[in-house]
Amino acid sequence: MLSIRPLMPADVAQVLKINVEAQPNVAALDRVELARLAEVSSTHIVAADGNAVCGYALNFGRDDAYDGEEFLTLRSLIAQPFVYIDQVAVAGPVRTRGIGRRLYEALERTATDRGISRLCCEVNTRPPNPGSLAFHAKLGFSTLSSLATRDGRNVVLLEKRIIGGTLT
């Protein structure tokens, strides 16, 4: 049975494996970087079937001390609290089973519980990630801005206003 739960140290190897499968649509992680991100935010989550992690979501609150370029740009654009979804990745064999949507639903519930009415993220347009753009559009995300990153990517910065605590 699939559960959404906090990321735990025992999940690291499986998260890193999923991360490798999902590149270049997500930034590469190693143990050191994942540990650093876990220090910055305690709200990262995984989708797990028993002990088997099949997806993860790294996320940060507006006031977290995260230094990601896209996050800092969003923070300069939005004064109100938001949850920034930095990475979501699902293991290849289970990609079409609604796990990404379940991760987003969990993040939205957490945001609503904390009185936060915005989810934000970015999606690559160079290299292109049309599947992610379609997924986010289906969930009700809209374009806030775009950004040419220092590492040579182009991204769109997206936001979703939470109304009534459910993804539409």
Image (cartoon, grey):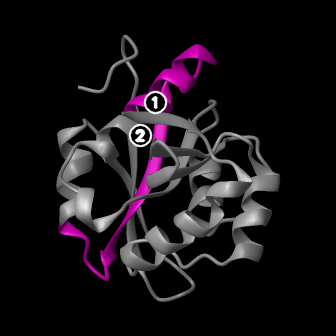
Q: Residue at x 23, y 26 (%)?
A: 168
Q: Return the x and y of residue 167 as percentages of the image width and height.
A: 30, 26
Residue 5 shown in magenta: no
Residue 106 shown in magenta: yes
Q: In the figure, 143 relative to 107: above or below?
A: below
Q: Which residue is mark 1?
A: 106
**Label 1 element class:** helix
Left or right of residue 21: residue 140: left
Give the residue furthest to the front.
50
Q: Which mark is residue 103?
A: 2
Q: Which residues are magenta?
A: 104-130
For the N terminus, which image quadrant? Answer: top left
Q: Residue at x 56, y 35 (%)?
A: 5
Q: Residue at x 71, y 74 (%)?
A: 31
Q: Return the x and y of residue 57 as percentages of the image width and height.
A: 51, 50
Q: Are marks 2 and 1 in contact (CB under 8 Å)?
A: yes
Which amino acid type is marked by label 2?
A: Leu
